[in-house]
Image: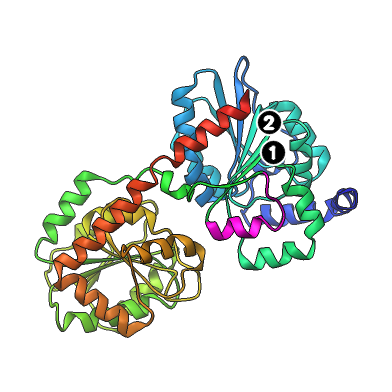
Amino acid sequence: MKLYKIISIFLFPIILICMIIRLIKNKENLASITQKFVLRSDKCPKNKLVIWFHAASVGEVNMAIPIIKTIIDERADVHCLITTITLTSAKIFKSANIKNTTHQFLPIDITFFISRFLAHWNPKVAVFIESEIWPNLIDATTKKIPLLLYNARLSETSFNRWRRYKDFTSSLLQRLSLIFTASNLDYERYSVFTKNNLKFIGHFKYSSPPLTYSSEYVQTTRTKLKNKNIFVVASTHKGEEEIIIKLHKEIKEKIPNIFTVIIPRHPKRIEEIISMAEKYKLRYVTDIDNYNNHETELLLVSSFGVLGNYFEISDIVFIGGSLVNIGGHNIIEPAKQGCAIIVGPHTSNFKDIIDDFKIKKAIVVARDYDELKCELLKLFNDSSYKNQLIANSNNIIASQKNISKIAIDTIYHYMK
């Protein structure tokens, strides 16, 4: 640990240069830079118990928000501090507009900055989401307060890397008061380094509320597409949209009224998807308000935060990042909105969740293009098959409803 502290100090000039480069590239701003170097902090609330949440990026922030909202509603004596690393995650949290909360950027992992940060905020307990392991941060924090790691994940790559430094990793993880792992597989991997502070209660994504949606938009879109069989394809990556467009053309031969909605993971890619639609001579719109021709076959969506609308509109959904080797994306969100879900073969990011859904016949995992086509046709043509898939999915969601309560009660326990 001493060696790491010395190395981190000597790396400071490089860190500073990297921050300046990120500032030039608009990946940082003056607020994030000054807060990461603890040159400026918001005022610490008086007569409040501070709970510190750290959620590095967007996914972790979305996981933390419902827990924070519940705590603020239940405890008038609490103020929640949330730290993030990226500008986007900061924007997401601030847009939630939760009272009695403060957002700050996480300090650089050098003991001097972390000590100043902790002295200013004086939190009673810290809750880190997923796999944020910063040695100086853990060392300084656990000397003062309990540190809980929620939804802890450990990929195979990280596990193999950590195992090379097993003694160092074990000494860090054993300082944490409690680690709730994201899956049984993560539990097994973490148990190589620590055991007494390890528990598995379920994936925290189950505790998130359903995605919001606009009832007006959903009703308008359903009315416009009332004679269509709607197929929603969400969170796609490069290489997937062309597969989906080809699939759409082949499916149309047997289901002439199919209407496909494509929502890329990165909306800035919409122009290349438009080019694909034109290449295959498919009629498309990029705004449902422009839909006035029944020969239109595609809706290409380039907006953030609208998945809830489309999961509500259609009950057949394909989740991207799984036809190409990305590892897949969150299937719990469409499951909570009563969708029959299809994914491709690449689902390593949510392996335990996907495996559970497969065992309970609550999801379709297509191993290749032909199987994807066959299963999609079956979902459109066999309503009992589709409805059973949705019912099985609903049962899984219902069985995980207590995760959030356990997480919050645990925080209260460690505040005493």
Residue at (15% x, 56% y) in the render:
222
Image coords of residue 184 (percent x, y): 54, 57
- Which amino acid type corresponds to the residue marked 1 in the rendered image? Gln
Q: Secondary structure at mark 2?
A: loop
- Image point (65%, 24%), residue name: 43
Q: Is residue 189 magenta?
A: yes
Camera-side residue: 383 or 400?
A: 400
Residue positioned 42% across, 44% down in the render: 208
Q: Are marks 1 and 2 in contact (CB under 8 Å)?
A: yes
Q: Is residue 33 magenta?
A: no
Element type at marker 1?
Answer: helix
Residue 41: mark: 2
Q: Which mark is residue 331?
A: none
Asked if residue 308 shows in the view, the reply is no
Q: Which image quarter holds the C terminus? A: top right
Name, please, the residue furthest toward the front.
196
Give x and y (percent) for residue 367: 38, 79
Which x, y percent locates residue 399? 36, 47
How packed mark 1 is, by other alpha carbons closer than 10 Å (few <14, some 14-19, many 20 or more), is many
| Residue range highlighted in magenta | 184-196
Among numbered discs 1 and 2, the one appearing first in the sequence: 1
Colour theme: rainbow
* In the image: residue 44, left or right of residue 8: left
Decide if residue 241 is in sight here: yes
Q: Which residue is mark 1?
A: 35
Question: Going 31% across and 78% down the picture, which residue do you hit?
Answer: 372
Q: Amino acid at mark 2?
A: Ser
Q: CA distance from mark 1 to mark 2?
A: 6 Å
